[in-house]
Every structure is written in structure tokens, then in C-alpha cells.
Amino acid sequence: MNVPDRAAEGGSRAGFERTPPKSARRRSRELAMQGLYQWLVSRDDAGAIEAHLMSNAPNVDKIDREHFIELLHGVVREIDALHEQITPHLDRPVVELSPVEHAALLIGGFELTRHLEIPYRVVINEAVELAKTFGGTDGYKFVNGVLDKVAAGARPTEVRPR
């Protein structure tokens, strides 16, 4: 008996679930994450980092370019304010954070304070996904815990005690 391959038809086979396609916004966060990682490690000019990523990243036509640029340049511009926002919730000094955790926290902190139209749970989830994608085994748990506390301070009316 010939059984059709459901995965080839757009379905899934046991154990092989299809992941939904990435949104343009998620792709812009991933590219901003790469740029911020580079900036945190090298302190190169953000404009040069942007130009390099825009000319070398795969599928750059599928990103939310405006959001990418705002994240990269906004975080660099507001680094001191973002550090003030996250530092009280850290268990170690900022300089001891891995660049991946650091960048994910900065993106999350920036979106929590500058993009009130994005629900705080979405902001935290996206930062956690960045930490899972680019970071170590448990770094995402740290990012989740810190941003939960940052959200409570940044959006007290949205984040009600659970």
C-alpha cells in the first residue's frame, strides 16, 4: 500500500511538526541581535554594522527593515538608560553577561519601553526566543526572569500581579 507523505503535502508526519514561517518582525529582531552582538564585542560604528548586515545577511528582503534599524540604533543610542533599567534585576554585573544574553536583554528592554503597542508577553517571548536561538543552554531562563521584572516596572498597568 502506498501511503502519501503528509509532510510533502504541507502536513506533518509523526514527530516532524512544521514550524510556522518567521515573521518579518522576528527576522528583524534576529538581525538586530546579530548586529548588537557585534557592537557589544567590537564597539564598531552601528552604521557600519548595519551596512554590513544589510549587504550580507540572507533573506534581508524578508525583514521589517524599519524595525531592525530602530532596534540596532535605538539600543546603541540608549544603552545607558537600558542598563539602568536592567541592572537592578541582574545577579551579576553587566560586564559579566554573555554578549547573547546582554543583546537579548537590551532588545527586550528597548521594546518594553519604546514599543508599547507590542504586548509585554510578546516582547519577553521574542527575547527568550532570541536567547534560545543564539545563546547557551539555559541563558533564555535568565533573560525571561530579568525581563519579567523589567516589565513589571516598565508597564505596571499592563503587568498586573499574577
Image: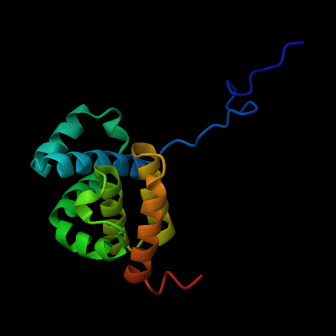
Name the image quarter holding residue 71.
bottom left
> How many numbered circles does the render carry?
0
**The C terminus is located in which quarter?**
bottom right
Q: Is residue 5 above or below residue 81?
A: above
Residues 77 and 82: in front is 82
Q: Is residue 19 above or below residue 92?
A: above
Q: Is residue 78 visible?
A: no
Considering every residue shown, the one lying at the far top of the view is 1
Task: Tell me residue 25's x, y (percent).
Answer: 40, 52
Name the image quarter holding residue 103.
bottom left
Q: Residue at x 27, y 54 (%)?
A: 66
Q: Is residue 111 visible?
A: yes
What sort of colour scheme is used for the picture? rainbow
Considering every residue shown, the one lying at the far right of the view is 1
Task: Tell me residue 160's x, y (percent).
Answer: 53, 85
**The N terminus is located in which quarter?**
top right
Q: Residue at x 25, y 70 (%)?
A: 82
Q: Residue at x 24, y 51 (%)?
A: 36
Task: Tell me residue 31's x, y (percent).
Answer: 31, 45
Q: Is residue 47 above or below residue 121?
A: above
Q: Residue at x 32, y 60 (%)?
A: 107
Task: Tell me residue 125's x, y (percent).
Answer: 49, 60
- Position of 142 with respect to 104 (left or right) is right
Residues 106 and 66: in front is 106
